[in-house]
Amino acid sequence: MALIELRNISKSFEDTQVLDNFNLTVNENEFITLLGPSGCGKTTTLRIIGGFETPDEGQVFFEGVDITNVPPNKRHLNTVFQKYALFPHMNVEENIAFGLKISGKSDAYIKDKIKYALKLVNLDGFEKRKIDRLSGGQQQRIAMARAIVNEPRVLLLDEPLGALDLKLRQDMQYELIRLKNELGITFIYVTHDQEEALTMSDKVVVMNKGYIQQMGTPEQIYNEPENAFVADFIGDSNIVDGIMVRDKVVKICDTIFPCIDDGFGQNKPVDVVIRPEDLIIGKPGQGHLDGEVVHNVFQGVHYEMEIEAGGFLWLAQNTTSYPVGTKVSLEVEPENIQIMHKPQSEGEEAIEIDV
Ligand SMILES: Nc1ncnc2c1ncn2[C@@H]1O[C@H](COP(=O)(O)OP(=O)(O)OP(=O)(O)O)[C@@H](O)[C@H]1O
Ligand SMILES: [Mg+2]
């Protein structure tokens, strides 16, 4: 049985529909991430799960029991909000201890827990520090510590690492994964950072404008995006119009490419996704398309280049640098050509992409 289930949830604020017939299941001990652009309904979804927002339609289930009308403090969930609400007049220790005191834990237990939690978030010895004497990132980590000590069945985290610098964010990502494995907590995590989502999650839910665009493992989301929105949102991509001539043959930029997809019919317009790292750069005449390098930047691991070929500006990544002005050819292995049908359903019409 699913641990949490959202069934046919709809939610509007005034005349804006934020969620439209939204369905989601979360399994026990799963790390699930809601990923999508600003305003797509991530926080609203999390608040509905936490009980801080009531859906207009639909139900929320916890272990099969309808909890739609159960108040937040009666749900086995703990939330770290996007705007972490620490008590400014209390010090760090008092903030972390707050929930534990309410649930009647002993002083010794609470002291232990605080020490453990502060170590976990890299703030050893900060017990007596006043909240307003902490940096934004430190406050964010205290908010995490406060949620963790309660050992909830489910942790709802709304962009909890947003205010941290890259190194600390990566450390915290590993800590969270470790917590999940050690404590068996289920995580529902919100971020608009695709890399963070791919690193941490068992399951990623890509959202846009209140609709789920795709749900799957990080590998599925990255390697087999189901539509152009997902492909565009997850990593850099070349998304180009194509015609599926017949099974396993697609025409891109008026050129025939062999691919491995079938079942799209004959001469059907499709979206084609090719990852920048999958473009093979060769000498003119060697590949499918001839073109010219028009932009080149070194990015540490590779060179990122823009190549004009077949009337399209291709984004390519390669460990070899081809200077601006170099005449090249482009080729793609059939299995690296991802074919997607053009948007048809209502949900997909919410997709807006600027290619
Ligand atoms: N209390 C509210 N009253 C009116 N509109 C709201 C309210 N809360 C959210 N909204 C609107 O609902 C939409 C979704 O908001 P939500 O906070 O869920 O987005 P989000 O995906 O979390 O975005 P972000 O990444 O910016 O945090 C937005 O258009 C927002 O303006
Ligand atoms: Mg939000």
Image (cartoon, rainbow, N blue to C red):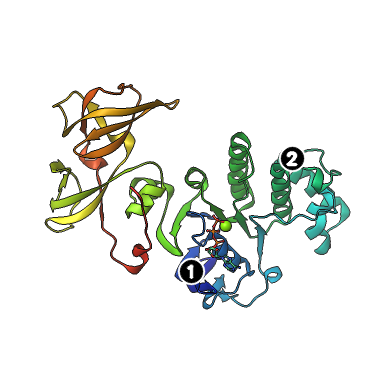
The image shows residue 130 at horizontal and vertical percentages of 84, 46
The image shows residue 118 at horizontal and vertical percentages of 76, 43
Q: CA distance from mark 2 to mark 1?
A: 38 Å
The amino acid at mark 2 is Lys
The answer to whether residue 55 is above or below residue 229 is below
The amino acid at mark 1 is Leu
Q: Quadrant of ligand 1?
A: bottom right
The image shows residue 45 at horizontal and vertical percentages of 54, 64
What residue sits right under mark 1 in the picture?
19
Give whichever of 323, 5 is nearer the camera. 323
**Tag on residue 119?**
2
**SS under mark 1:** strand
Which of marks 1 and 2 precedes in the sequence?
A: 1
Residue at left 25%, top 30%? Answer: 280
Left or right, 266 with reference to 281: left
The answer to whether residue 65 is above or below residue 159 is below
Q: Quadrant of residue 329?
A: top left
Residue at left 51%, top 61%? Answer: 27
Residue 302 visible at all: no
